Image (tube, rainbow, N blue to C red):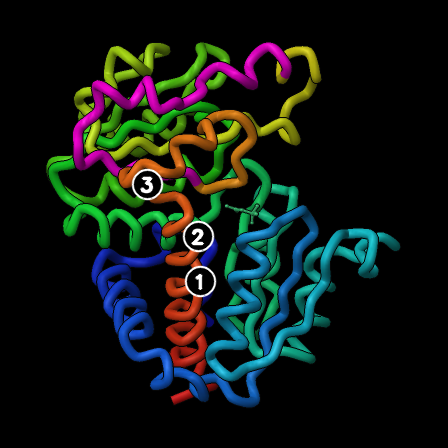
Amino acid sequence: MKSLIDILDLTTEELDELIATAEDIIANPSKYAEACRGKKLASLFFEPSTRTRMSFEAAMYELGGNVISVTGAGTSSAAKGESVADTAKTVSCYTDIIAIRHPKEGAAYVTAKNATIPVINAGDGGHCHPTQTLADLLTIWREKGRFTNLTIGVCGDLKFGRTVHSLINAMSRYEGNRFVLISPEELKVPSYVKKDVLQQKGIPYVQTTDLMAVMPELDILYMTRVQRERFFNEEDYLRLKDSYILTVDKLKTAKSDLAILHPLPRVNEISVAVDDDPRACYFKQVLNGKYMRMALILKLLKEAGQIK
Ligand code: CP
């Protein structure tokens, strides 16, 4: 049973195929309106979410399917101590595909090991968030027309930001890309990402604390929120939370075709005035997430023999 736990579960050919399907859905939505008729998505969110949960649910409805939800650990038998494995076996009895968000790293993997239906990781702790990366990739594709020869700046909480880890993994598979890792000292990219991905593949990268110094080089600027929920103490969070605030003024030295991405939610790290800049792509990214989740649901249900 094929599931999506990590972005590397998909080959670059499969990513191309998902992007082609998403583009076709955008161009011809009515063609897909009955594609999942009679099928049910289990939307299991044991951690807060707006975009990921709603876009999965909107995706399934727009494919003609239905949704059964758990929102918040307190509303399911997880609150009584039921294991992730038993939850997976149970949910497999009622639905055809699972999207799960969980605060513990590895929970989506355990779900996939125990479910009898495809499982999609909708974010597991600080580990990864592959469907956000699908949204990011479609946005990069639509804005830049390529995945190669890009200077990609990632800025903010690179330690706990699971979307950053998945994006670095994904973009490291394409030729000619270079990363500029912009963060406070305490929130640097974990060494396993540097060693196992960037260094092992010989991908050029620099680490800096100074966003303004590198702004003119960037083709993509991927801003991230400082992840309050993953900090061990509030004092450190308060000290670091406003390390980077992108403003209209700070964009003066940026390329005219820079693409500004952010997985959202935003707190302070992008000033609201930047939203009017044509280079701001983060709300397009939100919509792209729905199309890529539609393409992914179709692919996994087809491979499971559940739809044609
Ligand atoms: N980007 C993202 O995962 O947003 P939510 O937490 O609102 O789902």
Instruction: Tell me which corner region of the image, top left, top right, bottom left or bottom right, holds residue 275.
Output: top left
Query: Where are the magenta residues, as a range?
Result: 238-262
Determine whether 259 is above or below 110 in the image: above
Name the amino acid type tagged 1: Lys
Q: Nearer the viewer, residue 165 or 65?
A: 65
Q: Which residue is mark 1?
A: 290
Image-based side of 147 in relation to 72, left or right: left
In the figure, is residue 69 to the left or right of 169?
right
In percent of width and height, residue 24 lies at: 27, 74
Q: For the residue carrying disc 2, how many other residues have a C-alpha within 10 Å: few (<14), some (14-19), or many (20+)?
A: many
Q: Earlier in the sequence, mark 3 or mark 1?
A: 3
Q: CA distance from mark 2 to mark 1?
A: 7 Å
Query: Does residue 190 appear in this view?
Result: no
**CA separation in Å, label 3 and label 2:** 20 Å
User: Marks 3/1: CA distance?
Assistant: 21 Å
Q: Is residue 59 left or right of residue 278?
A: right
Location of residue 222 with respect to 52 vertically, above or below:
above
Q: Quadrant of the C terminus?
A: bottom left
Q: Nearer the viewer, residue 299 or 34?
A: 34
Mark 2 residue CB less than 8 A from any atom of ligand 1: yes
Q: Secondary structure at mark 1?
A: helix
Q: Secondary structure at mark 2?
A: helix
Q: Is mark 3 within 8 Å of ligand 1?
A: no
Label 3: few (<14), some (14–19) or many (≥20) C-alpha neighbours in 10 Å: many
Residue under the image location 37 percent in, 84 percent down: 30
Indicate the secondary structure of the residue bearing disc 3: helix
Label 3 is placed on what type of residue?
Asn
Per the image, the residue denoted by label 2 is 286
Q: Is residue 260 visible?
A: yes
Q: What's the amino acid at mark 2?
A: Val
Residue hosting label 3: 169
x and y percentages locating residue 68 in the rendered image: 68, 73
